[in-house]
Amino acid sequence: MASGVKPRVKVPKTAAAGETITIKTLISHKMESGQRKDDDGNPIPRSIINRFVADFNGENVIDVVLEPAISTNPYFQFDAVVPEAGEFKFTWYDDDGSVYETSKEIAIG
Amino acid sequence: MNSTQKLTSVLAMIAAASLATVISAGPDEDSLVVNEEIEIVTEAKAPAHLEHVDTIYSGWRFRSDETQAVQMDDFDNPAMIFVEAAAEAWDTVEGNAGKSCASCHNDVASMEGVRAVYPKWNEAAGEVRTVEMQINDCRENRMGAETLKYTGGDMAAMVGLISSVSRGLPVNVAIDGPEQSTWQKGKEIYYTRYGQLELSCANCHEDNYGNMIRADHLSQGQINGFPTYRLKNTKLNSVHARFKGCIRDTRAETFKPGSEEFIALELYVASRGNGLSVEGPSVRN
């Protein structure tokens, strides 16, 4: 089901302590809504990313519930305060049970 | 406020309103830099063979600020998802010769400059060839692999990958060598009215660029940004698919993608953009 799924994130390599940075994330995913029908008229089962979470050093930054109306390749851009050097961890949860993870280090400088 | 003042202010409002109309009727004044490093020429003096246009503009200049912004960073540009997939395909061995694109061409960076000069005369084959035709020629004759569908997703992505390494270089297709008769044919098609609506390419993209066609802002129909990620269908679109769409919209029977007619038209339309930067994969409506 989940073919061609690839998470991508863009986080600055460094930031000043306490600085607010912009994070961009995108995961390539079909986001099949469950509303469409195939050529034979049978409904195509829903298959979407249903949750997206970003954590910084174990602390939650953003937790998003995604609904079927969200279009293909969901993209999130958000701001986060960076109090110290550490690691951003990004997790996407797929309807089919797959979990996609990626992480980015950020240094203070 | 006396009546003279009233009249003056009303006139000023009309003047302001009509000025705003004039401004929105042309390309905007924005300039395009991709990834804060690749400077893209979106406005240039028209090549000498163009009779009715003085300045050529990339289609990027006719889009809204929001759409323009999406193309300014590769992370934001959804076309890059397809380009990344094509980069994997570039290194993937396919066919019975046991080769990938990279086996002969090494890194895709070696393709720098290719997109800028295509469609191009191929001496051995004695015909004008598009990038798509070259890709399929390689696949069939060197890799022993199946050819890709001319306007299919895999093909558009591969052309997008090859195009992406030429971004910023000026489009410079040759038109007065052995390809001249093909170019001439393309020019004829460009100025021929097709379909029940009896529209030629020129009627919209030469006579009326900058004007609105219903809710859409007509560009000059330049193809320096192809393949193009369109927001309307969320995929990469090839030049010939776009040609087909345009001719269909005139309510005509269209030529086939990959046909002689469309190859000729692609050469001619590409030559109308000689001097603009290669921009593909671009983002448009």
Image: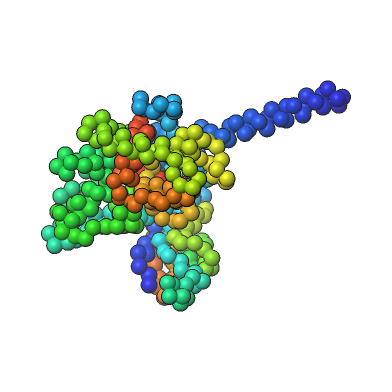
Relative to B172, residue A108 above or below? below
Near-viewer residue (B279 or B33): B279
Say how the picture is coloured: rainbow
Tell me residue B230's x, y (percent): 45, 51
Relative to B119, residue A45 above or below? below
| Quarter of the rendering containing residue A26 | bottom left
| Quarter of the rendering containing residue B220 | top left
Q: Give the residue displayed 47% in from the left and 50% down from the top.
A: B251
Q: Quadrant of the N terminus of chain B?
A: top right
Relative to B3, residue B86 above or below? below
Tell me residue A108's x, y (percent): 42, 49
Q: Give the residue displayed 68% in from the left and 30% down from the top.
A: B16
Tell me residue A29's x, y (percent): 41, 64
Q: Give the residue displayed 43% in from the left and 75% down from the top.
A: A40
Tell me residue A41's x, y (percent): 46, 75
Near-viewer residue (B186 or B278): B186
Relative to A50, residue B15 above or below? above
Q: Is residue B152 visible?
A: yes
Query: From the viewer's perspective, is B33 left or right of B117?
Result: right
Give the residue at the far left of this rendering: B97
Q: How many marks?
A: 0
Q: Is residue B38 visible?
A: no
Q: Give the residue displayed 44% in from the left and 49% down from the top.
A: B252
Give the residue at the far right of this rendering: B2
Give the residue at the far bottom of this rendering: A42
